[in-house]
Image (cartoon, helix red, strand yellow):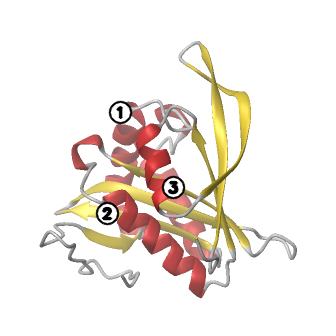
Amino acid sequence: MAITSKPNSSRSNAKGRFDYKIRVAAPDDAEALFHFGRELLSETDFFLRSPAERANSIDEMRMIINRFQELPRHLLLNAWKGNFPVGEAVIMGGELQRNRYTATVGVGVLQEHTGKKLGRTLMEGLEHFAHHAGIHRLELTVMSHNARALRLYEKMQYRVEGMRREALHVNGSYVDEFSMSKLLGEKP
């Protein structure tokens, strides 16, 4: 899958037509992505941020998009169904000499669109970008009870490196968090 800033990139899956467009976020997407982010974060407690901790305005979302475009090892990738964003993946590469080959990744898909290989497609897009950006290691964190995300990451060859016990406080309870990574080019 090629990553493009053009709104017409698409992909077919094994079951037929893939009804989503995958593309790099552009400043003109700020309003749609602002509202999408609020909806995504309000659907589940599996994200580190709450809805109020994402962009607080359309202008702030536009500034975030611009920042991702300025940094060489950062990418904000979105899945669109028609004119509506329904999924998002981010990669944030290290900015220092010693960590420039490592990047943190994250992915989220609206519940209505899960189970359609959209999360996997977005993660594959991040890996494609990482390969071309010279990134060697991808890492992420995931709440220990997020079974769906854990299955996806394990299928994509991410390995659990450790568990941070009671690292997060979610809805009045402490939650464990797994640290996972994948070395690009490593054989399973």
Residue at the spot 77% in from the left edge and 70% down from the top edge: 95
Q: In the visual, does 11 lie left or right of 56?
A: left
Q: Which residue is mark 2?
A: 79
In percent of the image, x 57 and y 65: which residue is there?
91
What amino acid does circle 3 point to?
Glu
- What SS does tag 3 mark? helix
Mark 3 or mark 2: whose residue is earlier in sequence: 2
Q: CA distance from mark 3 to mark 2?
A: 22 Å
Tag 2: residue type? Answer: Ala
Relative to 27, does residue 171 appear above or below in the rendering?
above
Image location (x, y in percent) of residue 184: 62, 76
In the image, residue 166 above or below residue 143 = above
**Where does the image place residue 102, in percent across and percent down from the top left?**
72, 69
Figure quadrant of residue 186: bottom right
Dot 1: element: helix
Label 3 crowd (10 A; few <14 / some 14-19 / many >=20)? some
First in sequence: mark 1 or mark 2? 1
Left or right: 1, with 162 as reference point: left
The quadrant of the picture occupied by the N terminus is bottom left
> Which residue is depicted at the point 41% across and 57% down?
88
Name the image quarter holding residue 122: bottom left
User: Which disc is residue 43 wearing?
Assistant: 1
Check disc 3 and report the residue beneath it. 154
